[in-house]
C-alpha cells in the first residue's frame, strides 16, 4: 500500500490577496491553515464568527466563492484560481 502526502499546491484569491492551498482542502480548511480564523460577524452584535462544524451544518463559515451567493466554505474544495470574497456575510440562520 502506498501513501502520498503530495497534495498539489495551488493558489486561490481571498479578498484580493493570493492564498496558497493544497488540492483536496476545503476553502475553510485552506483559510484556517493560513491563519484566517474568522471572516464573518454576527449581524446582531458584531461578534466574530468562525467555522464550527466543518461539515456543512452550522453555516458559520459562509462566504462568497466565484461570485456565488453565500456558500459554506467547508463544503467547497479549492480549485486553482478560485476567487473568495468575505465582504457582506453575516446572515443569521434559524
Ligand atoms: S463550518 Fe459549519 S457549515 Fe461550514
Image: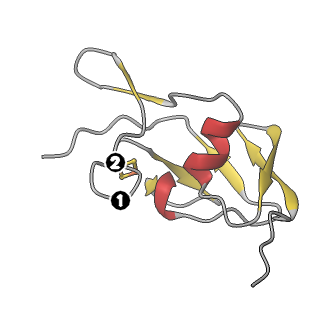
Q: Is residue 42 above or below residue 93?
A: above
Q: In which quadrant of the rendered view does residue 79 lie?
A: bottom right
Report the residue marked by disc 1: 56
Q: Is residue 14 left or right of residue 68?
A: right
| Residue 88 position within the rendered picture, expressed as x and y whole percent measured from the top left | 47, 35
Task: Identify the residue shown where x is 35% and y is 59%.
Answer: 56
Instruction: Kindly check if marks 2 and 1 are in contact, taking CB atoms under 8 A apart as contact.
Output: yes
The front one of 59 and 64 is 59
Q: Does the residue tagged 1 have its C-beta within 8 Å of any atom of ligand 1?
A: yes
Q: In which quadrant of the rendered view does residue 60 lie?
A: top left
Q: In which quadrant of the rendered view does residue 37 lie?
A: top right
| Residue 94 position within the rendered picture, expressed as x and y whole percent measured from the top left | 12, 46
Q: Nearer the viewer, mark 2 or mark 1?
A: 2
Report the residue marked by disc 2: 53
Quarter of the figure that contains the N terminus: bottom right
Task: Identify the residue shown where x is 87% and y is 58%.
Answer: 9
Amino acid at each position: 500500500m502506498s501513501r502520498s502526502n503530495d497534495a498539489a499546491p495551488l493558489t486561490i484569491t481571498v479578498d484580493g490577496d493570493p492564498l496558497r492551498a493544497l488540492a483536496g482542502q476545503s476553502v475553510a480548511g485552506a483559510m484556517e491553515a493560513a491563519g484566517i480564523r474568522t471572516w464573518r460577524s454576527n449581524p446582531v452584535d458584531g461578534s466574530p464568527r468562525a467555522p464550527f462544524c466543518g461539515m456543512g451544518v452550522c453555516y458559520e463559515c459562509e462566504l462568497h466563492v466565484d461570485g456565488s451567493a453565500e456558500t459554506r466554505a467547508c463544503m467547497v474544495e479549492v480549485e486553482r484560481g478560485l476567487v473568495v470574497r468575505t465582504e457582506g456575510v453575516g446572515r443569521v440562520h434559524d
